[in-house]
Image: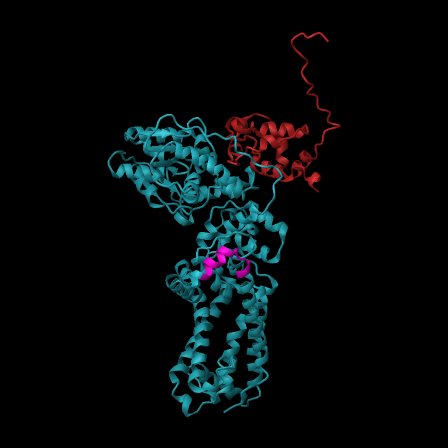
Chain colours: A red, B cyan
């Protein structure tokens, strides 16, 4: 194939029929407020761990709904609670993060 | 001389043997649950004369006299010390009587308890009139305590308690048998007083009962009843809240030895749980009880659920707590609810590994004697860090702002979530950046950071100081000269600064230099948490609203013009719902300098 100096980007399509959204469904049970997120990004703006692991609760919720792996982002979280303080929707983000870490790949472990 | 033995002593002896055996084996079990290092430390502390004396003094003052309860409410104090000390004296004097008048029977441990049944009045015992008087006197004291205890069940508010716990069925059995013991003893001794002798209480009673009944058929049944009441109380004791009586005697030496909770169910934590008398002082204390649904999440119910091994509820209660520490501050026994919860949280396994190895905390370019570390919460409230910087400049202090461009967390929130290992890793990172600044004084405007820096960091050669104390020192030295205004401020004691670190006076003195100070209804160690605490894992935004409003009602009881606090988290939380301005102490002083 002729090299034009650029390639096509890898498809970012998510086939919701194929991805595993069990963690998201679990979160809807333990922290149903997650549905109230309007992706304003306040949590991302204040996050202490953002420079460290690209942590952002907004992105985490986004990835969660699409079944994307969230562990790398969560690994930097220091649970400082700033995201909870600024959330205009009153989501208990700290509890969300702790529950995610707790139930992450729970079925595989079992 | 009357017989040496009578079958009625059997219930008492069986109960006593059971409870002594249970406590003995329980103690051995708990000692073996302690980590080896702690156990050695504890045993060594027992032979240290200073700690040994402290143990004896604390056991006497707390278990028998109940000094803490006297301070809280004299009626409550009298009720407890009359029963505990009175009963102790009855047992002690019973032994003295046996020692003096029937020394051959000292080996029979039921003898001192049922002395009046076994030993008849004789030439010898007449000489013990003082002892007989004291026995009757202390019986009267105990009976007055029991009367108060009965009144307390109906009118707990007279004893300074708005809410009390609901006793379980076994607790009720223990309670009623305890109530029954002393009236039955009075009756039993009254029936035999013409044979055994007695004093001002039981002899007149004897005249009355013999005057009415005129025979002795009631004598043995009442002694049976007395013994059965004792036996029932002893038999149920290990499974009721009355287990606190023997456990507290082990809790005090444990605490004086300086042990800490390492496992939520074993060793020190176990003895704390058993020492909980279930009085319910923590129910009124807990800021969460402002909402009635939260009453069952207080420390007393945590202890009860731990004893019942109700894992689901234990987790719920442990995760909900805001860790403000007020229950510990008010607990008469010193049960550390938040630390038990923290240990419980630390047992949980998380699937995502934390990794802070890439974390680099920015070190300041400028080097200075004073380093200011704002911390996460102050970065969220830049008004405070601006005020701190402004005051430092006004006082002419050279300083370095360590985390101006954002830094790392202090690790306290991780600690409170029970993730001790991760917290230590993060602390190491933060510590490096503090040490790199080369400062002599570390200035902090957040009490959450202040507490963990002081307790966990071991920053040798660096003075860790909270900004309220630092600015008060600057005012004392005359480097800051605030002017007074007419505004009436109320000062809110942040949990981590007040109860957590014992700083109550300096912020108040500092505020008085620039305004009038009024006090909240509950202040200092009884200050009510703002309910924005990071301690709670599960309390959501909506749940906290009612609690914050209750805290605000407590603060504004004296109708102040504004609220001052010394914690960025309290400031943000109160600001959400307060009708009057809320500011940090640094902002107040900065506006008047």
- What residue span does the magenta drawing correspond to? B31-43
Image quadrant where one finds the C terminus of chain B: top left
Residue at the far right in the pictured view: A17
Q: Front-most of A54 and B472?
A: A54
Residue B511 located within the stretch drawn in magenta: no
Q: Report whether residue B157 is seen.
A: no
Secondary structure character of the magenta stretch overall: helix
Q: How far across and down, in percent of the image, does residue A57 sit?
A: 58, 30
Q: Report whether residue B288 is seen.
A: yes
Residue B32 located within the stretch drawn in magenta: yes
Q: How far across and down, in percent of the image, does residue B549 sit?
A: 48, 41
Q: How far across and down, in percent of the image, does residue B130 sit?
A: 38, 82
B545 in relation to B7, above or below: above
The image quarter containing residue B475 is top left
B352 in relation to B162, above or below: above
Is A105 on the left-hand or right-hand side of B123?
Answer: right
Q: Residue at x 59, y 64 (%)?
A: B239
Q: Front-most of A84 and A100?
A: A100
Is B11 on the left-hand or right-hand side of B588?
Answer: right
B376 in relation to B551, above or below: above
Q: How far across and down, in percent of the image, does residue B366 sit?
A: 35, 26
């Amino acid at each position: 194939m002729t090299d034009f100096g650029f390639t096509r980007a890898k498809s970012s399509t998510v086939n919701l029929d194929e991805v595993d959204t069990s963690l998201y469904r679990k979160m809807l049970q333990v922290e149903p407020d997650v549905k109230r997120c309007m992706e304003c990004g306040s949590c991302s703006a204040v996050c202490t761990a953002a420079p460290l692991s690209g942590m952002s609760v907004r992105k985490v919720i986004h990835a969660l709904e699409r079944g994307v792996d969230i562990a790398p982002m969560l690994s930097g979280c220091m649970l400082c609670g700033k995201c909870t303080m600024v959330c205009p929707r009153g989501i208990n983000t700290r509890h969300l993060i702790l529950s995610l870490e707790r139930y992450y790949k729970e079925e595989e472990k079992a | 001389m009357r017989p040496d033995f009578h079958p009625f002593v059997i219930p008492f002896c069986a109960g006593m043997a059971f409870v002594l055996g249970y406590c003995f084996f329980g103690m051995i079990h708990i000692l073996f649950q302690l980590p080896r290092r702690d156990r050695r430390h504890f045993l060594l502390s027992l032979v240290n004369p200073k700690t040994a004396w402290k143990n004896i003094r604390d056991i006497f003052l707390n278990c028998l006299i109940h000094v803490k309860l006297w301070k809280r409410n004299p009626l409550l104090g009298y009720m407890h010390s009359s029963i505990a000390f009175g009963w102790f004296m009855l047992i002690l004097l019973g032994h003295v009587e046996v020692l003096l008048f029937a020394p051959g029977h000292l080996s029979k441990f039921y003898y001192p308890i049922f002395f009046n049944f076994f030993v008849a009045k004789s030439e010898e015992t007449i000489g013990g009139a003082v002892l007989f008087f004291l026995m009757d006197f202390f019986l009267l004291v105990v009976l007055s305590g029991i009367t108060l205890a009965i009144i307390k069940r109906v009118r707990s508010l007279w004893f300074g308690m708005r809410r009390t716990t609901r006793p379980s069925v076994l607790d009720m059995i223990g309670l009623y048998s305890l109530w029954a013991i002393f009236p039955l003893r009075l009756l039993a001794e009254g029936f035999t007083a013409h044979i055994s002798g007695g004093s001002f209480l039981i002899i007149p009673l004897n005249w009355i009962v013999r005057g009415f009944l005129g025979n002795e058929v009631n004598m043995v049944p009442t002694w049976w009843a007395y013994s059965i009441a004792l036996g029932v109380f002893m038999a149920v004791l290990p499974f009721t809240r009355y287990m606190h009586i023997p456990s507290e005697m082990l809790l005090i030496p444990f605490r004086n030895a300086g042990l800490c909770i390492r496992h939520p169910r074993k060793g020190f934590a176990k003895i704390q749980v058993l020492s909980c008398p279930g009085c319910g002082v923590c129910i009124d204390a807990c800021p969460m009880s402002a909402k009635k649904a939260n009453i069952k999440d207080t420390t007393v119910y945590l202890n009860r659920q731990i004893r019942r091994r109700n894992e689901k509820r234990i987790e719920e209660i442990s995760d909900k707590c805001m860790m403000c520490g007020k229950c510990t501050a008010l607990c008469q026994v010193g049960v550390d609810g938040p630390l038990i919860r923290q240990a419980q949280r630390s047992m949980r396994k998380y699937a995502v590994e934390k990794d802070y190895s890439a974390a680099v905390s920015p070190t300041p370019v400028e080097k200075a004697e004073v380093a200011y570390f704002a911390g996460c919460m102050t970065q969220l409230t830049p008004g405070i860090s601006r005020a701190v910087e402004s005051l430092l400049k006004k006082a002419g202090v050279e300083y370095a702002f360590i985390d101006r461009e954002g830094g790392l967390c202090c690790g306290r929130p991780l600690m409170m979530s029970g993730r001790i290992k991760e917290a230590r890793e993060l602390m190491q990172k933060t510590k490096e950046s503090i040490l790199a600044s080369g400062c002599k004084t570390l200035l902090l405007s957040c009490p959450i950071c202040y507490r963990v820096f002081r307790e966990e960091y071991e920053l040798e050669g660096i003075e860790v100081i909270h900004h309220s104390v630092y600015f008060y020192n600057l005012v004392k030295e005359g480097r800051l000269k605030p002017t007074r205004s007419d505004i009436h401020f109320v000062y809110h004691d942040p949990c981590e600064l007040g109860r957590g670190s014992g700083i109550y006076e300096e912020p108040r003195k500092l505020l008085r230099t620039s305004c009038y100070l009024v006090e909240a209804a509950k202040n200092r160690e009884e200050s009510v948490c703002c309910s924005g605490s990071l301690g709670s894992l599960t309390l959501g935004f909506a749940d906290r609203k009612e609690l914050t409003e209750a805290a605000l009602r407590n603060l504004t009881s004296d109708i102040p013009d504004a609220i001052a606090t010394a914690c960025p988290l309290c400031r943000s939380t109160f600001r959400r719902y307060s009708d009057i301005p809320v500011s940090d102490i640094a902002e107040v002083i900065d506006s008047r300098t």
